[in-house]
Amino acid sequence: MMKTQVAIVGAGLSGLYAAILLEQANISYRLLEGREFVGGRIQQAGHTGVDVGATWLWPAVQPELVSVLADLGVSLIPQNEAGDLLYERAAGSLARYPGYVSSPPAMRVRDGMSQVIEKLLQRLPAAKISTGVRVTHAARADEHITIRGTATGGEEIVLQAEHLLLALPPMLAKNIQFTPSLPKDLTDDWGHTGTWMAAQAKYVALYDESFWIAEGLSGEGRSMVGPLVELHDVSVPGRVNALFGFLGIPAQSRQALGEETVLSLCRAQMVRLFGDKAASPSAEFLKDWSADSFTATAHDLMLQAAHPLPPAFPLEGEWVESLTGIASEWSSTFPGYLAGAIEAAREGVNRVTATMTPTTRSFP
Ligand SMILES: Cc1cc2nc3c(=O)[nH]c(=O)nc-3n(C[C@H](O)[C@H](O)[C@H](O)COP(=O)(O)OP(=O)(O)OC[C@H]3O[C@@H](n4cnc5c(N)ncnc54)[C@H](O)[C@@H]3O)c2cc1C
């Protein structure tokens, strides 16, 4: 059985950043990730660098995230808002307005948010990260936690740790079977915390030319007709020209329609908004987060989007000192956001390092 001081479940931004902090603190850890790849809600369309998950940060109000990104050496660019915005208020009516400037300004990572994940990975020993392992059980006895998961091939993975960092959304953490049980109030709170953006889907279209820029458009669009309700330019400079839109059709309807139909509806809308040049994208992507069981549960599709703040650890019972939630939903200042993942991971690791002795010994 693998033994370590800290087990991290989930290799999204919070889990990977926690691993970096534990490396720096000389605390041994293992990271278990259910998907075959790391990044969680940060994902790109193919290998284009175009985000299908998280895209923006707001540096004016998120200094900690900015400093982490600066340390990783990624460059930021402003979200393009120069040019006119298109507004489709009703079928057959398309208005064009001077674009507005958001405040505080939204920025993107120049080569896509997945760059952040790649840079974090470069700083972590690959041997400490296991992908394709869905954690299902955590049992605490004799000061140790035994964590069990199932690998993609069906093999059981067992890990022993002293502390468990839950770097997965509270709603999914609740599905892990804890022995002894966690306090019911706590798991009820986790079960009522919707995973931010879990019910959303993004459509991305790549084009050989950024024809909208040439026509004085910013690529921003709003529509009351749909299926896309909010559109933006997400080009990666020097690499790809891209527009994306959030789907306004509810998740259940998207699934009933099927991907091919949704894609053709999106393409038809792009032509309505941007003209014939939008008829033949060089590639299209549809990422429906609601259909991804490593992000969304059926319950997420029924919740109103909100940011309740669930407790990150129990205040009573056997698990008090040995478990901490660090996914973005557990952040007090930016719950659900990238900045929240950084904050919650830092706070969770501080809680761990306050009670653990650093080691230079690496466990087998
Ligand atoms: C479409 C979309 C757009 C967004 N836009 C923005 C934005 O513009 N700006 C912003 O700040 N935020 C945005 N967000 C939110 C942002 O992506 C998240 O806040 C952030 O990525 C969360 O990171 P995390 O590590 O806390 O959680 P996650 O990224 O969800 O990571 C959790 C990890 O746990 C893994 N996991 C789940 N269950 C298990 C299990 N049982 N065993 C093992 N592993 C498991 C998952 O596979 C995943 O890798 C967006 C999210 C989406 C989906």
Image (cartoon, grey):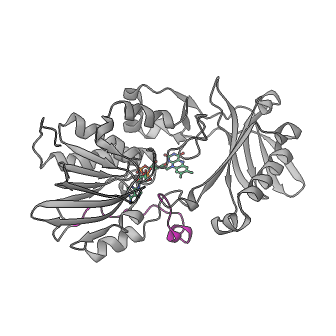
Q: Is residue 175 left or right of residue 77?
A: left
Image spot of residue 25 (x, y percent): 19, 37
Q: Is residue 7 magenta?
A: no
Drawn side of residue 277 relative to residue 60, left or right:
right
Instruction: Measuring from the top left, give residue 66's x and y in whole percent.
Output: 42, 33
Please identify the residue farthest to the bottom as the structure is shown.
184
Q: Is residue 164 left or right of residue 342?
A: left
Residue 227 seen in the current view: no
Please indicate whether residue 312 sits to the left or right of residue 226 in the image: left
User: Where the C terminus falls, by quadrant?
Assistant: top left
Picture residue at 19% right of the left edge, 55% below the top: 160
Q: Is residue 136 visible?
A: yes
Task: Give percent across and percent down for residue 189.
Answer: 36, 70
Highlighted magenta segment, given as a residue range: 294-314
Looking at the image, is 138 positioned above or below residue 5?
Answer: below
Q: Residue at x 33, y 36 (%)?
A: 126
